[in-house]
Image: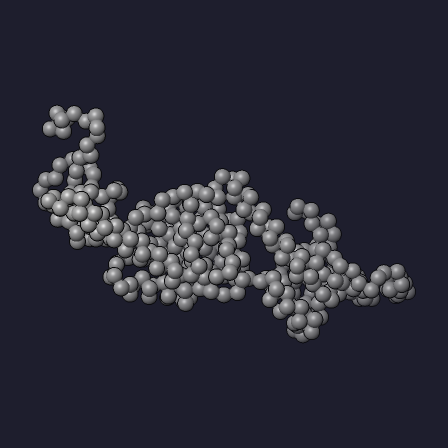
Amino acid sequence: MDLNKKIKDCLKNNLDDSYWVVSEIGEMRFNQKGHCYLELVEKRDDEILAKNKATIWSYTYRNLSGWFESLTGQTLKPGLKILSNVVVSHHEVYGLSLNIKDIDPSYTLGERAKKRLEILNRLKEDGISEMNKDLPLPMVPQRIAIIASSTSAGYLDFITQIENNSAGYAFRITHFQAIMQGSEAEESIIKAILDVNANIERYDLLVIIRGGGATLDLECFDTYGLASHIAQFPIPVITGIGHERDETIADIVANTSLKTPTAVAEFLISGIKDFEDSIIKNKQILDKLAPEASFRSFSYPIGVPRPLTKLKAGRHFRSCRGGGQTFNSGVADLNNLKAFFLEYNLEFNSIV
């Protein structure tokens, strides 16, 4: 007991009233009274160099945590690096501990920005940051895989917008359920991405959407794991994360990033409308250039046309032609007739 008293007196007489300490929260728990008990650690890479017990008394925690979250968009949690003002104390039973009096949010914001930059640089170094962006968007996307929470307002807004579009365009939507916020979100979204990829030939696009929310809810979209899956996905990915102010790493590596689920729906609808408008406009130009001619057939500028593509083109032409390098025989689809592509060096006898 005398030794404990000497240690306590030594600390009191030789240390300053408080210190600013940089550390990482290693563990964190609460008791019934709301007091917060932490383990603060110092690391080099993944090696722990030092650790100390720490406390935040309930009254201080209620004030600090809400203020910290409002400024940084993050909750105090294990794995977070903080700059805290601590008082060193020694208890006869519990030993040495640090009592946290204040936390500087500007340090954590700087660490978050640093970590984000490191992830973006890693994606570039791995050569995958632009892979999904380089994929061409389908001219008339109809078969949409969508990752979202089925109960979220964002998902319901998207479905309502798609199903009630004024042009009457029809889409085939396949929903993949996922947790879109919280500690389990990253793993859940990646699993959904892998499920889509298992039948990738069934889809033209992958859409990832969520409703609005606090900035801290976006943390799962700022990880290397999720970003690398999106960046390397074999079909275009469109994100509608639902936050006006912040651009996540997932947004940056996706083919197309829009602010809200409703904006994603409008983008898909407008893409088909633009395609139909271009057909009408080109036909009008041709009619004007050659009024004596009758333009009755349309040639698709793409591969195998989707049903909606055929429907839109068929409204304006008697027949539409694709490729195939073969003749039509038997029952033929007038909106997708087979055709030969004539090359400049192709001899007439080879066609015959």
Placement of 45 over or under 105, stated as above or below: above
Residue 17 seen in render = yes
Q: Residue at x 78, y 60 (%)?
A: 19
Placement of 176 over or under 118, stated as above or below: below
Q: Residue at x 67, y 57 (%)?
A: 107
In the rendered image, which quarter contains the N terminus? Answer: bottom right
Splitting the image into 4 quarters, where does residue 28 fall? bottom right
Q: Residue at x 41, y 42 (%)?
A: 134
Q: How is the image coloured?
A: one colour
Does residue 107 appear to the left or right of 147 in the view shown? right
Splitting the image into 4 quarters, where does residue 6 fall? bottom right
* Residue 305: x %, y % from top left: 24, 46
Splitting the image into 4 quarters, where does residue 268 fall? bottom left
Q: Residue furthest left?
A: 330
In the rendered image, which quarter contains the C terminus? Answer: top left
Number of numbered discs visible in the structure rendering: 0
Residue 229 seen in render = no
Does residue 147 appear to the left or right of 111 in the view shown? left
* Residue 275: x %, y % from top left: 27, 51
Q: Nearer the viewer, residue 7 or 328?
A: 328
Q: Residue at x 37, y 66 (%)?
A: 156
Placement of 130 over or under 209, stated as above or below: above
* Residue 189: x %, y % from top left: 45, 55
* Residue 274: x %, y % from top left: 29, 53
